[in-house]
Image: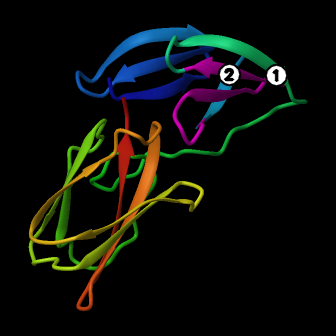
């Protein structure tokens, strides 16, 4: 289930929103006045800054239970993963000003990522990196439609860079199992 975590400052809770149904699937009690949320790159944990508690609640995203509370000092505020107004739903904005010639789907993906090009991408080099910039996959692609096995990748945001002798295209996708 694709989901978003939203802090409810005056209710001392975090709502988990199912983005498929656009409804709240659960509500989690956290510390006093949660004012910000950050998600680990692999999506396994959500960290919630509790402003009046001087603490951070750690939510396990599999169980949606607070696994621990970390004292951090007075008035913490999290400034982290923001929702982007860009078409792709990963929460990290894209700033590519070039017209899109590559379509990837499904996004998020759990096993196979399909890559469709409006132009032939004969002998194009595909490089996929994780959010930290580590290379996690390389392949030479041919043709207009290609499929890439991403089942070995952990949950999280990944970036692709497709380069040929005539063009270069960058983008991002999410792996969610």
User: Which residues are the magenta region?
Assistant: 39-60
Name the residue that disc number 2 marks. Answer: 58
Residue at the spot x=90%, y=30% of the render? 73
Residue 154 shown left or right of residue 80 in the figure? left
The question of residue 41 being in magenta is answered with yes
Q: On the rendered structure, is 8 left or right of 24?
A: right
The colour mode here is rainbow
Residue 13 vs residue 132, the one in the foreground: 132
Residue 30 visible, this orientation: no
Q: Are marks 1 and 2 in contact (CB under 8 Å)?
A: yes
Sooner in the amino-acid sequence: mark 1 or mark 2: 2
In terms of secondary structure, where does tag 2 sit? strand
Residue 145, image x, y percentages:
10, 62
Q: Position of residue 57 (x, y in %)?
A: 71, 20
Q: Quadrant of residue 121?
A: bottom left
Look at the picture and state if 22 lies above or below 165. above
Task: Identify the residue at the far bottom of this view.
Answer: 166
How many neighbours does mark 2 have within 10 angstroms: few (below 14), some (14-19), or many (20 or more)? many
Quadrant for the N terminus in the image: top left
Residue 70 badge: 1
Query: Which type of secondary structure does the marked residue at label 1 adopt?
Result: strand
Number of on-image labels: 2
Label 1: how many Cα within 10 Å (few below 14, some 14–19, many 20+)? some
Between 79 and 140, which is closer to the camera in this rendering? Answer: 140
- In the displayed structure, 12 sits above or below 103; it is above
Magenta run includes residue 169: no
Q: How far is mark 1 from mark 2, CA to CA?
A: 8 Å
| Residue drawn 39% across the image and 46% down it | 90
Q: Quadrant of the C terminus?
A: top left
Q: Is residue 77 left or right of residue 36?
A: right
* Residue depicted at x 45% and y 36%: 155
């Amino acid at each position: 289930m694709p989901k978003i975590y939203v802090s409810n400052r005056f209710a001392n809770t975090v709502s988990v929103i199912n983005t498929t149904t656009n409804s709240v699937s659960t509500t989690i009690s956290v510390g006093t006045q949660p004012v910000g949320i950050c998600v680990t790159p692999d999506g396994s944990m959500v960290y919630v800054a509790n402003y009046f508690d001087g603490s951070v609640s750690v939510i396990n995203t599999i169980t949606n239970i607070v696994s621990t509370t970390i004292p951090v000092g007075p008035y913490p505020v999290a400034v982290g993963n923001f929702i982007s107004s860009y078409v792709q739903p990963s929460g990290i904005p894209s700033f590519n000003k070039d017209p899109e010639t590559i379509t990837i789907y499904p996004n998020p993906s759990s096993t196979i990522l399909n890559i469709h090009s409006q132009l032939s991408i004969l002998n194009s080099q595909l490089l996929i990196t994780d959010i930290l910039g580590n290379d996690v996959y390389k392949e030479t692609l041919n043709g207009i439609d290609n499929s890439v096995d991403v089942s070995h990748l952990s949950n999280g945001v990944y970036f692709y860079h497709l380069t040929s002798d005539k063009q270069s295209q960058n983008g991002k996708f999410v792996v969610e199992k």
